[in-house]
Amino acid sequence: MTTGGADDGAAEDVTDRSRRRLLTTIGSSAVFGTLGLSGCLGFDDETTVDGRVADDPAVFGLPFPYLPETAQLNPWAGSYPWAIYPLLFESESLTTPTFDQQPTDLIEDVAIDGPTVTVSYSDEFSWWNGEPVTARDRWVTERIQSFVSDVDADRPIDDTDELGELEASLLTDDPIGTNAMSMSLEDEYTLTYEFARPLARPLVLARVLGGVHNVAAWWFDSWLEDLTEAGTATERTDVVADLQRTKLPIAEAMEIGYGCGPYELAEVSPNRLVLDPFEDHPRAASISIPRLWLPVAMEQATDELVADGAIDGSYGTLETLRVEPPAHLEQLDRYRANDGMKLVCNWRNPHLARRNVRRALLCALALDDLVERSGWGEPAAVQTGLTEPLDRRWLEESVLADLHRYPVAADHEQAAAYMRDAGYTRDNGDGYWRDGDGNTVRIRLRVPLWEEWAAPTELIQHDLDRFGFDLELEQVANNTFFAYVDEGSFDLVPWWTDGHPFSAYDPTDSDLSSLGYGIDGESEGDGEAPEPRLGKPLEPTVPVTAGDVHAGTDGRERIDLLEQWRRISGQSGDEAETAAAVATVARWWNDAVPDIDLGTDIVGVWGNTREFSWPTAEDPRYRQFGSERRPELELLKAGAIEPTGDDR
């Protein structure tokens, strides 16, 4: 199971995918699409371990956007190579843009019996040093993560049986929650999970097979032993701090055989990594590319490699590259992803708490220009909280047809009409909209200091200033930005969305990629209803007639978002029931615009078609990826790319 650590070594919650994605963006910039990275390291000596050179037509080139002397493979420490690590390990599942998740051949079976889920691992896989890959690796991962996440809790730990049940300190025991209550290691190849209630299969697979098998029990056992024996919170804090300081350098990983993918590390040098086929891998017979060459390449160096034709494939689209690609690089597939971008609205701002002000803000933005200049894909055609592939996956055509279509191009006339409907005026001579008390619409927009976000930030500022909002823009360093997000100290912030209902409509998650409510129980200790984060409602109203943005009180009905979430996330034999709940929340989102959908990512795979033979255009594997959304790495690991034998 994939865990994560910030670049400063701070541990990261295993479920905090968006935060890690933010850190990945910091560490590797747009390596997935534009291959734009920071820094530069030369690669003048291109001879590999056995005398082969980089332009050998049988060698497949991929950029390595890290310094080998600092990149390391302890996922609880910093400097983890997020952009490339799936190449070194086996994925436990692959998913698609419509969030259809399937176990890989590492997993023999996932048996779901009500709230009990049993995962059986294959006994055919091994680490590069010959140690078996087992369910115990995953069990050790979750055990350690529970201590890391709960490091400050002063609770006794009396579970010393290594095959015992995981004390679910980081996992909710809330009946609307979707995390596991407990996990038991039945034998070396079998794990059993207990959930508080039966869950929908997509959620089950996301919870039990959500990552890459990148933690070896034989290397981390001693840490788990130390954490288990620590009797106080102080002692556990010391052990966790030591864990987060301890690096597993890539060169050491090569020496000790720390990896389980079909390609193993053969060379780690200051200028490159080289991987050769791992002969004892179950798919070894399917691997036909004899060597992978990963030059250390950042920014200009990477661009030069792409322009020179030394990079043989990548996730993304050729149109987003900053250099002219050579003719033998072709776009092999291009499609809408389940990922997207949105503007998160903090309803504790008294203006953004008003439905028509949020609608006006949406109409004031030129979404088409915004996503084009930012590389954020295609503008959101309909506001549902879902990205386009998931709209079509879960909402019937009749439902989509009834929903209101807000303008994609800036429409200040419509925006002004919404503001007037909300009781605002703009006749005071200074250009600002003001409420009935004379207050300007002051909005704090917080963004990180990233070069690739400069253009969209400028556009947002331009559009909202021009419309008459009193915008306070603050572009801040990463740590400050994280703090603002964690504390809710913002009115607007750009953020990612996973775009599927099992994340976007989740009120239990505090992550902004979901609803961001952070509801961890049905009621507070005093019996009061839980209070969602950022001031958003649990029981909003929706128009009786879908898409009727002018519906008055008599034309609206109240819904319970927690109840809709139970229906979406719960185990059901009737997909129509789940779809009906998804449609109900989509109707609310379309009317209320709790956050503003900006766009759906456009992604794909491009590659060298002169020296390598790729699957046909219709092959579904172009749209199957692991936790880091790198289908080209999974194609390599599956042996789906073969040398043609032609010279470069």
Image (spheres, rainbow, N blue to C red):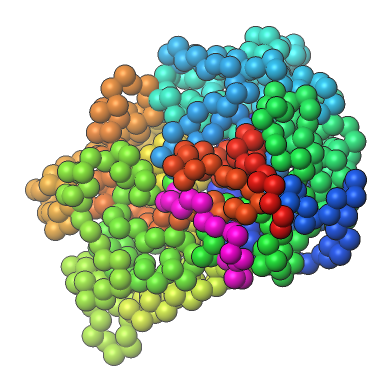
> Magenta segment: does it hold 323?
yes
Q: Furthest residue to the bottom? A: 429
Q: Which of 393 and 266 is in front in this view?
A: 266
Left or right, 281 with respect to 195, comes to right
Q: Which of 518 and 87 is in front in this view?
A: 87
Q: In this image, 185 relative to 593: left or right? A: right
Residue 227 x, y percent position in the rendering: 79, 26
Q: Given the current orientation, which residue lies at the most extreme left position? A: 554
Q: Residue at 47%, 20% (x, y): give it.
A: 196
Q: Quadrant of the N terminus?
A: top right
* Residue 297 at x, y percent in the picture: 76, 61
Q: Check the image and name the residue furthest to the top.
A: 186
**470 in relation to 87, above or below:** below
Q: Where is residue 428 in the image (x, y as percent from the top left)?
A: 27, 87
Q: Which of 73 and 145 is in front in this view?
A: 73
Residue 261 appears anywhere in the view: no
Which segment did they paint magenta? 321-337
User: Picture coordinates of residue 171 (x, y %)?
Assistant: 56, 28
| 563 up-or-down from 249: above or below | above
In which image quadrant can residue 238 be found? top right
Q: Residue at x 65, y 17 (%)?
A: 122
Q: Residue at x 61, y 70 (%)?
A: 323
Any part of residue 645 in sight? yes
Determine whether 113 is above or below 285 in the image: above
Could you say which quadrant of the image residue 342 lies in?
A: bottom left
- The mark total stands at 0
Does the magenta run of residues contain 382?
no
Measuring 43% from the left and 51% from the top, which residue is drawn there?
335
417 vs 358, left or right, is left
In the displayed structure, 221 sits above or below 289; it is above
